[in-house]
Amino acid sequence: MSFFDRLARRIAAVDSVVSVGLDPDPDRLPDHLRDHDLPRWAFNRRIVDATHEHAAAYKPNVAFYEDPDGWRALEETIAYADGKGVPVLLDAKRADIGNTARQYATLLDRADAITVNPYLGRDALEPFLSRTDKGVFVLCRTSNPGAADLQDRELASGEPVYERVAALADLWNGAGNVGLVVGATAPAELAEIRELVPDLPFLVPGVGAQGGDAEAAVEYGLAERTLDGTAVGVGLVNSSRGIIFAGEDRGEAFADAAGEAAKRLTKRLNRYR
């Protein structure tokens, strides 16, 4: 079964398109977890326990795990999420050429999907795209303020770079495993890109702490997919800090606050589905 079919089943099962970003900043972990052998794993396990009923996916950003203890924490987290039946999307933004790209793509041995950078072109993404059972989310129009520096620049054809990326990603979708990363902080661009590529699911960051447009994230972020004869809107709307650090001031009850935040976001997004 393809990644997006598995994701469609998960979305239907929990009635949610929420992606919970597992970005355990060591400086923000609760004090009572700091003496744990793997504080990031201890934190993530409690977040997963509190949020999995509302999570269509988990999205760990690998930047928070790139050290020996971090990789161990990430592997434990992925296995635990898998045990809860929740897909894991690694936010890695990888791409390179030759054997380096092939090595980066081994991250998909662990996870269900990954984010990639299209700047180097198709050959740099081929090791990811060839994993046809895995999801590949191509950076298109990101949610950060500096995205306009390059992504909004017009090409000689008159189209902005992000539109060209979307069109290329559509061409690269021969196996049906490609999606796009399009931020909720750019709702007009979200609408434009959806019109260009009606069949690609989006990963939409920026709804939580960045204050992106939740209605636009749902209206334009989901691509219709048929599952067992029923149409399901497939895509993910991510919140990281807005969920996992919702209880930063609540001590040992931090996970309860995360669960409440995930539930609130699910209800908020479901109003527009």
Image: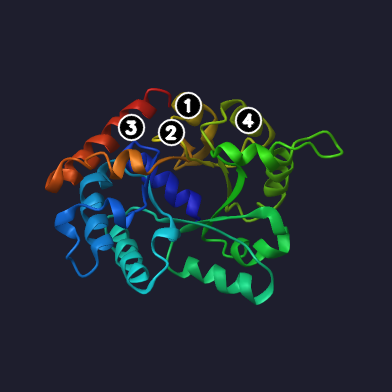
| Depth check, front residue: 59 or 196 | 59
Which residue lies under the disc numbered 2? 207
Badge 1 marks a residue whose secondary structure is: loop
Upstream in sequence: badge 2 or badge 1: 2
Q: Quadrant of residue 37?
A: bottom left
- Expressed as whole percent of the image width and height from the top left, the position of residue 225 reads 52, 39
- Disc number placed over residue 88 in the picture, else none: none
Which residue lies under the disc numbered 4? 189
Are the residues tagged 4 and 2 within 8 Å (C-beta)? no
At label 4, which amino acid type do we have? Glu
- Expressed as whole percent of the image width and height from the top left, the position of residue 72 reads 33, 71
Q: Quadrant of residue 27?
A: bottom left
Residue found 43% across the figure and 33% down from its top: 207
User: Is the residue marked by circle 4 packed among few (<14), some (14-19), or many (20+) residues within 10 Å?
Assistant: some
Upstream in sequence: badge 2 or badge 3: 2
Query: Which residue is farthest right?
Result: 156
Query: Which residue is farthest front?
Result: 27
Which residue lies under the disc numbered 1? 213
Badge 2 marks a residue whose secondary structure is: loop
Upstream in sequence: badge 4 or badge 1: 4
